[in-house]
Every structure is written in C-alpha cells, then in structure tokens.
C-alpha cells in the first residue's frame, strides 16, 4: 500500500523527519534503544555498527562513503571510532545540515555531498569502503545503487549494509497487502543475485531477531513518551510512528518481514 504518490514525495518526507531528530524526545528514545545520539532513523543499533566496523577493517588512511547517511548515523560514529575519513551522501538536504552541525560541534571533519544513490557524485575507485543502513528498502533503483557502490569502491574494497526484506514465502504466495515495512521493501531480483553479478563476493547474515527486539523497544519507548511525541511530531505522525512499528512486529511474527546484513567484497578485475 503506497503511502506516497511519488519517490520524490517520499524523499521529501525525510526532510521533514530529519528536522525533528535533534529534539529532546527523539534523542532520548534513540539513546535508550540504539545507544547513539546521531539522529538515527534506521534500525541499526550501536552493537551492529560495531560489526560494520569489524568487517570493514578501516584505518586512518581510509575513506568511507555512507549512502543515505541522513544526519550521520552510522558514518560519523565509524569515523570517530576508526579515524577514517567520512563522506556522507544523501538526497534530502536537512539531514546533511544536521550532520554539518554535529561535526562542527565535535570539532571533526567530514565531507557532505548531496546526491542520489543511483548516480553517486564520486569518481571511480575513490573509496576503500561503502556502507548504508536500511537504505535500499527506501528507494526503487536498487540495482543502480549497488552498481554505483561497485564503481566507487577500490578493487578489494568492502561494502556493508543492512536492509529490510520481504520473505520468499510472502513473495511466493503473491501477497500484496503491504501495510508494513518501508515504502520500497519489495525487490525485483534478490539482492544477493544482483550483488554477485555486479562483481561482489557476498556473505549474508540474518539479523531479524535483534530487529524484532529493537522494534519492540522502540514501540515501548514511543508509547511511554507519547504526549511529548505528539507535541514534537503532531498527533497523526506520532500515532503513525507507533502503528507502523507494531505492524512490523506483526509482519516479523507472521514470517513476512526480515532484516539482513550483507558483507560484500569488491572482486579484483579478472578474478
Ligand atoms: C532509513 S533512513 C537511514 C538514515 C541513516 N543512515 C540511519 O541509519 O539512521 C534511509 C535514508 O536513505 C536516504 N535515501 C532514500 N532514497 C535515496 C536515494 N535515492 N539516494 C540517496 N539517499 C536516499 C533517505 O534520505 C534516508 O536518509
């Protein structure tokens, strides 16, 4: 069930959402559930981003591109932990402005670029690592984004990402009553097939169990601060934030929705 009339309108909704991430109530929920304060809007917890870090093996010499970075989760945290240089790319501008405020406040450096994931404003083979957190389920041009990740990565570089997905049984049964998950959760072709044919060596892990616990904690945190959420977001958006998360829990329990972590190594040419 599409909530937005176009992808452009959907992307605009992020602009509106990012204008609230630094509010007291949202930061409180983020700290309680995710253990961060970077304005996270994906489902990646701090422990999961530590796994991103472990898989990418970044040093101070390396450059990391975060696609759909919003206000900077997880790239700014990863840069803080590893000393790598962070390049934040997003299409809506509001999240990048929040990120700029954050790096200024912390006295750090990061590059912010406004751009579409399917046409990254970066040269070929220019970064050692790319990450994104629940971004592919928020856009339609999935194959183009994965191809762009391959193009900007140096040979031997690493792409790590999480994504929400419909299960094979949901798709096989032809069910279309999609009242859960992100706007672009459906795929035309499994991610692993696209990534492999693009030139990546791929490993996939199922992170649905932690996802379910995280969504439950988000629902509880939102409900316990509901009046403050209404004051910040408005009654409709506050209610929607709770209802959609509850639908995600129901979808996980029915076996319709999963969340996966992908670790992809860009093969060297000719291998
Ligand atoms: C679930 S949010 C994740 C934000 C942040 N990285 C986090 O982990 O909290 C998805 C992000 O994807 C971005 N996005 C959606 N479509 C995009 C596109 N075509 N190009 C670049 N970014 C896009 C949104 O603007 C948003 O910042």
Image: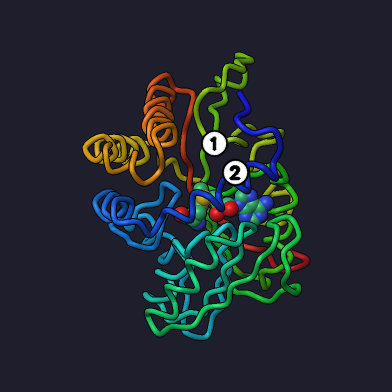
Q: Closest to the observer: 172 or 33?
A: 33
Q: Is mark 2 within 8 Å of ligand 1?
A: yes
**Any part of residue 181 in sight:** yes
Give the residue at mark 1.
182
Residue shown at 41% from the left, 39% from the top: 234
Residue 37 at what x, y percent from top left?
Answer: 33, 62
Q: Residue furthest left?
A: 224
Corner quadrant of residue 40: bottom left
Give the residue at mark 2.
138
Residue shown at 39% from the left, 22% from the top: 250
- Identify whether 236 is placed above or below 260: above
SS for callout 2: helix
- Whether the residues at callouts 2 and 1 have beta carbons within 8 Å, the answer is yes
Q: Closest to the observer: 231 or 180?
A: 231
- Identify whether 9 is placed above or below 198: above
Q: Closest to the observer: 133 or 265?
A: 133
Quadrant the N terminus occupies: top right
Residue 26 at what x, y percent from top left?
Answer: 33, 51
- Identify whether 140 is placed above or below 248: below
């Amino acid at each position: 069930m599409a909530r937005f009339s176009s992808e452009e309108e959907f992307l605009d909704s992020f602009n509106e959402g990012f204008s609230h991430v630094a509010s007291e109530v949202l930061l409180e929920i983020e700290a309680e559930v995710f253990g961060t304060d970077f304005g996270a809007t994906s489902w990646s917890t701090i422990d999961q981003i530590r796994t991103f870090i472990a898989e990418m093996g970044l040093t101070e010499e390396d450059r990391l591109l975060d696609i759909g970075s919003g206000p900077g989760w997880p790239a700014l945290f990863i840069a803080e932990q590893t000393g790598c240089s962070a390049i934040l790319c997003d299409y809506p501008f509001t999240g990048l402005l929040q990120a700029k405020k954050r790096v200024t406040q912390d006295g750090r450096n990061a590059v912010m670029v406004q751009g579409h994931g399917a046409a990254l404003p970066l040269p070929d083979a220019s970064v050692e690592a790319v990450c994104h957190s629940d971004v592919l389920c928020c856009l339609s041009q999935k194959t183009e984004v994965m191809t762009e990740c391959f193009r900007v990565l140096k040979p031997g570089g690493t792409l790590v990402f999480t994504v929400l997905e419909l299960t094979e049984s949901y798709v096989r049964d032809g069910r279309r009553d999609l009242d859960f998950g992100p706007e672009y959760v459906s795929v035309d072709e499994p991610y692993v097939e696209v990534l492999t044919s693009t030139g990546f060596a791929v490993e996939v892990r199922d992170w649905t169990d932690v996802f379910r616990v995280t969504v439950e904690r988000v629902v509880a945190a939102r409900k316990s601060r509901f009046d403050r959420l209404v004051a910040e977001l408005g009654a409709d958006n506050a209610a929607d934030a709770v209802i959609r998360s509850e639908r995600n829990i129901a979808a996980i329990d029915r076996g319709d929705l999963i969340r996966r972590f992908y670790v992809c190594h860009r093969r060297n040419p000719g291998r």
